[in-house]
Amino acid sequence: MLEHTRRDVARAKAADAAIASGRYLGPLHGIPYGVKDLLDTKGIATTYGAEPFRNRVPGADSAVVQRLNDAGAVAFNAVLKDAPSAGGQFVVQAGRVLKVAVVGDAAPGGGAFSHFGLWPGLNARGSLAFVASVDGGPSPMAVFVGGPGLVERIAAVGDDLPGGRLQSFGLYPLVAINNAGGVTFATAPTATGEGVEGIFLAGSDARP
């Protein structure tokens, strides 16, 4: 861990030196970040939190880590303090933090956003996919996709999917979006066995 810290300090100093010399790589230049132990990081143990991979050290960064290192756009879920809203989904584009949706905003299809999943997905075009809970709408939870100024609902609890009805996105909802706008999400049965279990792909302009 100490060696990793020394390396990161060296990288931070190099980033400062680059900016001082007029070389600016983008909006994330020199900004530290952390990634979950599910994404390969070159030269640093990536164990997936599992004992069989205790000593696994990948030889290359994952695509996500590489894009962060190349100073691409980043998306995040934020909890806000002393703000008009309790939290929301944001993207960083061209050095600016832009709001996609916050708690209390009207949700597509009815109701208002009340909570957001921890792990939004972002593609190279800047489109954001996320799972959110909705109060006062026809469905208590749904997958959404969009960006600053435009959000649409892709799939929601209660929708009919191939093989059955969507009843749950699972304990830890996950969503991903590719550069063509295809949104992937997982579903799970309820504790009493209702609902379809699977991984589904939906287009940004069509229901699954």
Image (tube, rainbow, N blue to C red):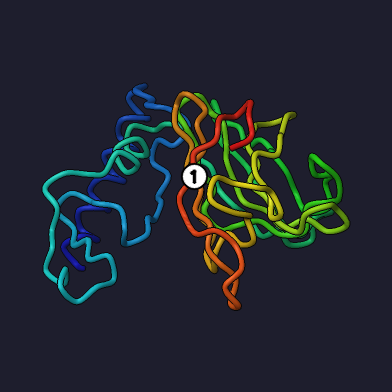
Number of on-image labels: 1
Q: Residue furthest front?
A: 163
For label 1, the residue is: 200
Foreground pick, 16 / 194 = 194
Left or right: residue 107 versus residue 208 is: right
Q: Residue at x 32, y 24 (%)?
A: 21
Residue at x-position 18% and y-position 58%: 44
The quadrant of the picture occupied by the N terminus is bottom left
Q: Nearer the viewer, residue 24 or 98?
A: 98
Report the residue at 55% width, 48% height from top. 76
Residue 143 appears at what percent x and percent y?
Answer: 63, 46
Callout 1 secondary element: strand
97 w.r.t. 39: above or below: above
> Where is residue 194, by image quadrant?
bottom right
Q: In the rendered structure, which amino acid carries the disc numbered 1?
A: Phe
Q: Where residue 118 sits in the image (x, y, percent)? A: 56, 58
Along the line of sight, which residue is nearer the eye, 70 or 177? 177
Other-residue count near label 1 (Cα within 10 Å), few / some / many at <14 / 14–19 / ≥20: some
Q: Is residue 3 left or right of residue 161?
A: left
Where residue 92 sits: x, y (%)? 56, 36
In screen coordinates, is 76 left or right of 14? Answer: right
Q: Quadrant of residue 208?
A: top right
Residue 27 position, x and y percent, is 48, 32
In the image, taking residue 160 as reference, residue 36 lies left or right, namely left
Which of these two is toward me, 127 or 196?
196
Please determine whether, in this image, residue 56 is positioned above or below residue 68: below
**For the point 31% across and 30% down, which residue is it?**
18
